[in-house]
Amino acid sequence: MRLGEAMARCPQLVLVPPVPAGVADAWERVLAALESIGAAVEPGGAGAVCFDAAGLLGLHGGIDGVLRATRRALDRPARLAAAPSRFAALAAAARARARRPVVVHFAGPFLASLPIDLLSLDGRTAALVEPFERLGIRTLGELAALSRAKVADRFGTPGLTAWELARGGGDAPAPRRPMQRLRERLDLPESASGPALERALALLVDRLLARRERRGRTIRAAVLEATLVEGGTWRERTVFREALADAARMRLVLAPRLQALPAPAEALALAVERFGPPASDQPSLLQDSIAVRRSRLREAVRQARVAAGPEAALRVLEVEPGSRVPERRAVLTPFQ
């Protein structure tokens, strides 16, 4: 319900500020705990994760042993399920209890009686829940009983995906790539905003690029985090257009992100989320030929004109340099 209505019903409610950075750190610890038992995890949103248990059956003594090892690794209440397909496992976990895992041996019969809104567990089919309900399809079994050709004709590729999921099919989990996280944090002496934050960001970028663990690699994606004075945290993920290791270019990309801060910050952190190839593999602008640089300049001019109109890129053309009237000395002309 809305905040005003909730406060009217319960004046003792306390508004808790969001902590996205803390959520991300806690979720990363959960994934690392699962990887410690040998699981190649595929993280979904915070709170849902899948992995293929086939390679762990011999290590932990069957599917029951895998479930016990998973519970010990998590060391917290969690709803666990095992099924022949990823979608069936997610559907079973949604119906499981915290201390009673569900093991499904045949996905099709298990899914037949479940509601159609479970398709929202898969991002590819979430938008089809409402159209299916309008057509009177209430369960996954009713969807699986339809003709494949009719579903494809009405809903296309997403419909085929939903039809296969309802019949117990689907893709295997795609494990995440192993990665090494580098993180630099700076405590600000006073609540900072504006130029002070930009100077702190410049220091964090320099420190991050100077870390020995980087081993000359470029940075593909980075995460900017802040601890707010009023409580809570702020987190912004940035994927660079190309992997880079240039401090000036990183500051140029990351500095505008600081404008999204909802309040002054008392601490700022910068972390590497994904590395790129070594910096020596990057083409340098200074080493490019004149033709390549000119083509890049023309492309930049085209993009500027598309975004801001035909007069976004002009050049100064001298007409009468010796004229006493300043307006006659030079004119603006379209850049060619």
Image (tube, helix red, strand yellow):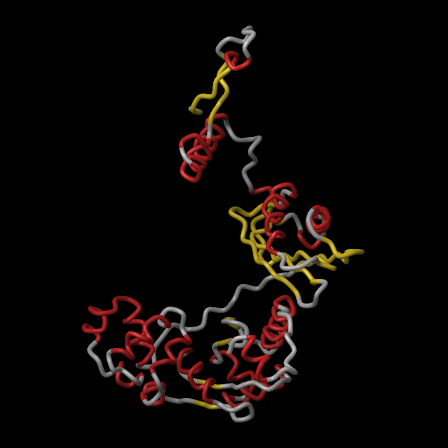
Q: Position of residue 307 (x, y in %)?
A: 43, 40
Q: Nearer the viewer, residue 281 or 87?
A: 87
Residue 33 lies left or right of residue 41; in this view the side is right
Q: Residue furthest front?
A: 8
The residue lying at 57 percent from left, 64 percent from top is 178
Quadrant of the snapshot with the C terminus: top left
The residue lying at 50 percent from left, 88 percent from top is 62
The residue lying at 37 percent from left, 69 percent from top is 124
Residue 187 lies left or right of residue 135; in this view the side is right
Residue 119 lies left or right of residue 55; in this view the side is left
Residue 184 quadrant? bottom right
Vertical relation: 165 (above or below) 243: below
Q: Nearer the viewer, residue 5 or 72?
A: 5
Q: Position of residue 129 (x, y in %)?
A: 33, 76
Q: Nearer the viewer, residue 80 or 251?
A: 251
Residue 195 lies left or right of residue 127; in this view the side is right
Q: Residue furthest bottom?
A: 100
Q: Nearer the viewer, residue 203 or 191?
A: 191
Vertical relation: 173 (above or below) 276: below
Q: Position of residue 245 (x, y in %)?
A: 62, 45
- Count of marks overlaid on the render: 0
Vertical relation: 29 (above or below) 66: above
Residue 263 quadrant? bottom right
Q: Position of residue 282 (x, y in %)?
A: 55, 41
